[in-house]
Image: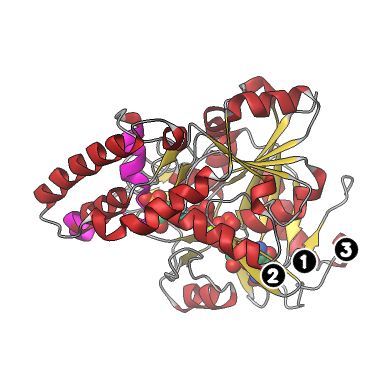
Amino acid sequence: MHKVDVLLGLQWGDEGKGKIVDVLTPGYDVIARFQGGPNAGHSLEFNRIKHVLHTIPSGIFHSDKINLIGNGVVIDPVIFSRETEALEELDIKPRETIYISKKAHLILPSHRILDAASEVSKGDTKIGSTLKGIGPTYMDKTGRNGLRVGDTVQPGFLEKYNFLKNKHREILKQYEYHDDPENYEEEWFAGIEKIKSYKLIDSELFINNLIKENKTVLAEGAQGTLLDIDFGSYPFVTSSNTICAGACTGLGIAPTVVGEVLGIFKAYCTRVGGGPFPTELTDETGARLRKQGNEFGSTTGRPRRCGWLDLPALKYSIMINGVSRLIITKADVLTGFDTLKICTGYMSGGELLESLPFDTTQPLEPVYSEMKGWNTDISRITRYSDLPKEFTDYTGYIEKETGVPITMISVGPDRTATVFPPAER
Ligand code: GDP
Ligand code: IMO
Ligand code: MG
């Protein structure tokens, strides 16, 4: 029996998961999303065209693969519908390869409005949510009020919808937020009809059967470990478990079937939205990283905050997920910096901390290790032995510090811009 490999972001999201999943897809039969929703923006690029996916697994461009949207995902029918239409225009047949869990929860128009109302009410302390309704939808899931994909084909769906909508309207009155769900219902119900034309399944049975049949599965995480509801920088987090354990609850698979845990990290750090970011650079260096890395959100277009690699945070993410292999992305973005810095700890109140403290508002001064940069363009390199020594020193240092091997190096957004280091180095 093949085990399920899990691929996750180890930072604050946007590590390049979409690109890497697309590169790895030929080696798997099934690609499965297990949490998050359209707050995710997973980009992948081939033949000079960039595609951004929000709800649909990043295996969709390989026509012979199964793409599963698991029970842990929250779906906005409008966004799902738009995504599938964009794919159909490219002659891809999403209806043939996408399977959707009946237990996945639906994002209602009123969830989106509540998300906005909640953010406005928070003022300066807002999370910086993508405003896709993620928080309110997961709240209704755990509050046992939510609507699921399977409900759409049950009698009484409209009554259930109206009941929840009216409940949300009452909450919106308390927020004194004026926008009505009915303004968005036509498109939403059209999206529901679209979803109903897809394969709606008991995905936990489906995936466990596939595993028994010896099919290979790659679980595709969304967001990143530092945005996890339990282990991220709470409250500046998303509302789902983005960690490896989330793959078990979000797909209905046992921990014993998890195989490799592939942890993706950027060669530096970015964060979009509010919350602590110890190595953030608000100076020219940060602006340079943003420019060279084209660091603008795939979902919202917001400029991403940029900073140096944070090793204690990376080690924490590796620990929480049990990462067995590391994948470094956007390595090319660091080209041309004379000196590269890697954070190895934080000073706080005269004390050296080796991990992020509970109190995320506490000012932290990063302690850096410095390394020499490289000047040669690495974005067209495909052989590990052609990489400059300064680069392999940088990755070698990370491997030594984390104790986990780097098994893939991404040097550009395109599928082909990927280097596989030999196992023996
Ligand atoms: P995801 O959410 O983890 O899938 O990442 P995003 O797609 O939101 O953000 C990653 C961005 O970096 C996208 O624009 C990718 O096209 C791009 N990208 C991915 N890998 C690389 C890389 O190795 N080098 C460069 N320069 N860009 C990359
Ligand atoms: P991918 O999958 C980066 C951030 C938001 C905000 C916080 C909560 O593309 O890596 P939410 O909309 O979930 O309530 O927002 O989480 N966030 C992301 N940041 N990449 C993502 O997804 C993100 N999804 C949510 O910016 O700070
Ligand atoms: Mg993204």
Under circle 3, the secondary element is loop
Confirm or reject: label 3 Cβ below 8 Å from ligand 1: no
Q: Which residue is mark 1?
A: 417
Q: Is residue 303 above or below residue 181?
A: below
Q: Residues within 10 Å of mark 2 (few under 14, many from 20)?
A: many
Which residue is more in the foreground, 233 or 18?
Answer: 18
Please indicate, yes or no, whether residue 56 appears anywhere in the rendered image. yes
What is the C-alpha distance between the residues marked 1 and 3? 10 Å
The residue carrying mark 1 has its beta carbon less than 8 Å from ligand 1: yes
Q: Which residues are magenta?
A: 121-141
* Residue that badge 2 annotates: 332
Chief secondary structure of the magenta portion: helix
Q: Is residue 168 left or right of residue 425?
A: left
Q: Label 3 belongs to which residue?
A: 383
Graded by Cα atoms within 10 Å as few (under 14), some (14 to 19) or many (20 or more), the crowding at tag 3 reads few
Q: Secondary structure at mark 2?
A: helix
Residue at 82%, 66% (x, y): give it.
387
Magenta stretch: residue 415 in it?
A: no
Q: Residue 74 sits in which quadrant?
A: top left
- Assess whether mark 1 and mark 2 are in contact (beta carbons under 8 angstroms): yes
- Is 178 left, or right, of 97 in this rendering? left
* Coordinates of residue 149 in the picture (x, y in percent): 46, 37
